[in-house]
Image (cartoon, rainbow, N blue to C red):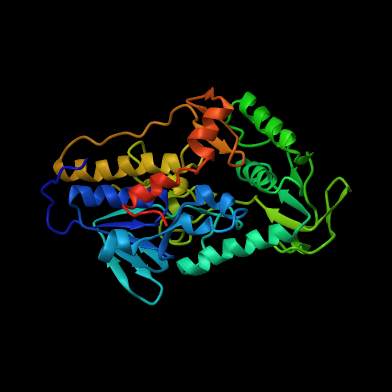
Amino acid sequence: MGGQLSVPEGVHVAVLGGGFGGIAAAQQLRSAGISFTLLDLRDCFHHNVAALRASVQPGFALRTFIPYAETFGGSFVQGRVERVDPERQLLVLQGGREIQYSHLILCTGSDGPFPGKFNAEASLQAAVQAYEDLVQQIQVADSVLVVGGGATGVEMAAEIKTEYPDKKVVLIHSRMGLADPQLVHSVREQAKEVLLEKGVELVLGQKVSNMSELALNRTQKNLEVRTDKGEILVTDLVICCTGVRINSAAYASSLADSMDPDGALKVNQHLQVQGFSNIFAVGDCASLQEPKLAYHAGLHACVAVTNIINGLSGKPLTPYRTGYVSMLLAMGRDDGVGQFNGVRLPRWLVALGKSRDLLLWKSWREMQQKQP
């Protein structure tokens, strides 16, 4: 990568989605001298790896949003893509604008409840304010119930209890095992140990049965939360960390034959979408047997861009190979659990490598901007 190549006339790559995979792809295309357009709903990249810290620590959210235009200039377009037209090789935006492409990299990612995800059409200022508002709600609550004990819920509960040790924090999870099932058992057990050490109360093997009646992210004293086992939990604030889904709206109609039931796109080993040689899927929207992680999205982007370049220069395409699972969970700013290539790491090492600043430095460096 990095070297300029002789690009045939008419080559223009559309990168749909400005998450971790999207900005990695855009930077690599720029380095190779290939014309591209990066499209996203918002005017700024969201380093959502740090979204949960931004929910508990005043002033932190500003560091998690990075403006696209300062990095990509006229190669960035803000807008909602309503339809992918693979026959005419163009994207149709809300309002009717069309963007032609020779190659398309789909990085639409996934959506889920705030604060773990923030996919609303909002300015940088509005996005930051949404997190600052949640910080205030947490500050005035005496007790918080976190719903969902996957990786996000585990990290959320740990963040709240670390920042506000005197608050009552309860984590409810429908299964007995916490965090991602693809983590080795000892790491999942360690996550449970850390939560208990911090004083988080665990309600495992139960689901919230009156979820639709509950106001999320808003403090209301003595809210009654019912479980499917008949238990009543009383709390001031409910934060939901379940229900992540693939963002497939832009391509659902035109690429339906290439989609899994959950909306992810079927890809070959070169990350080309099934049935298309010029459309690639990276990150959460690619149907791959591995956890949905920012780290993986960056790896996918490199393979997709390399294969566009190799295709243009007549070289063999590069395969993407999934490996042993590497995943780090920040358990507040002072602790963490995780594994690298399937091997459990010491807690202090995870805290040093991820928990302290949640890899913010990496995104600001990638976007070639200075942290505020």
Q: Residue at x 50, y 51 (%)?
A: 48
Query: Toward the viewer: 18 or 236?
Result: 236
**If the image is split into quadrants, where does the N terminus sit?**
top left
Q: Residue at x 31, y 70 (%)?
A: 98
Q: Residue furthest top?
A: 343
Query: Toward the viewer: 160 or 275?
Result: 160
Task: Give the image location of residue 300, x and y in percent.
Answer: 37, 41
> Left or right: where does residue 327 sit relative to residue 239?
left
Task: Give the image location of residue 344, x and y in percent.
Answer: 55, 24
Is residue 257 shown above or below 335? below
Task: Give the image location of residue 10, x and y in percent.
Answer: 16, 59
Q: Residue at x 38, y 70 (%)?
A: 93
Q: How many numbered discs, if any?
A: 0
Q: Quadrant of residue 215 in the image?
A: bottom right
Q: Residue furthest left?
A: 6
> Left or right: where does residue 73 sit relative to residue 252?
left
Query: Toward the viewer: 338 or 320?
Result: 338
Judge whether residue 46 can be spotted in this image.
yes
